[in-house]
Image (tube, rainbow, N blue to C red):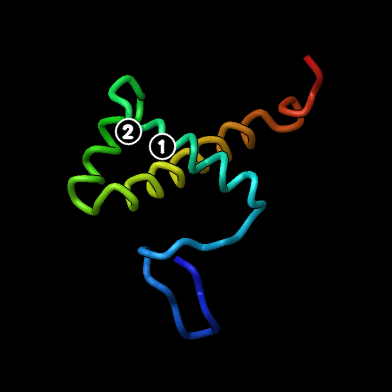
Amino acid sequence: MTIYSSDNKRGRAHLARQGPPLLRWALYEAAMCASRPASPDHAYFTTVADRLGTKRAVMSVARKLARRCHHRLRGLGDAAFAEI
């Protein structure tokens, strides 16, 4: 949810255009792959798509992917940036 000012909030149907545009694009494209039956997130995608529509399902999967990546990188700590 995004906040317009100290007391006004915008609903979940709109996207927050925060963060690097390239990262937002990559998350969107990765989430679009969830519509494929072979995707591990396909069941989640179809559940949300049936309830809210395809566009919102893609955004929901993108947020899920971002959270998953954040937690994985946070768990790795400095090792995430070490050379292989």
Report x, y in % for residue 43.
25, 31
Count of marks overlaid on the render: 2
Density class for disc 2 (Cα within 10 Å; few <14, some 14-19, many ≥20) is many
Q: Which mark is residue 35?
A: 2
Density class for disc 1 (Cα within 10 Å; few <14, some 14-19, many ≥20) is some
Relative height, residue 4 to residue 74 (above, below): below
Residue at 48% across, 85% down: 7
Mark 2 and mark 1: span between their CA atoms?
6 Å
Report x, y in % for residue 31.
43, 38
Q: Amino acid at mark 1?
A: Met
Residue at 48% across, 34% down: 30
Q: Quadrant of the C terminus?
A: top right
Q: Is residue 80 left or right of residue 44?
A: right
Residue at 32% across, 47% down: 57
Query: Which quadrant of the view contains residue 19?
Result: bottom right
Relative height, residue 83 to residue 43 (above, below): above
Residue at 54% across, 83% down: 5
Q: Residue furthest right?
A: 83
Relative height, residue 70 to residue 3 (above, below): above
Secondary element type, mark 2: helix
For the residues bearing labels 2 and 1, Cβ distance under 8 angstroms: yes
Q: Which mark is residue 22?
A: none
Relative height, residue 61 to residue 36 (above, below): below
Q: Quadrant of the N terminus?
A: bottom left
Question: Where does label 1 land, which residue?
Answer: 32
Report x, y in % for residue 50.
18, 46
Report x, y in % for residue 77.
70, 32
Q: Amino acid at mark 2?
A: Ser
- In the image shown, does 76 or 10 lie closer to the viewer? 10
Query: Which quadrant of the view contains residue 49?
Result: top left
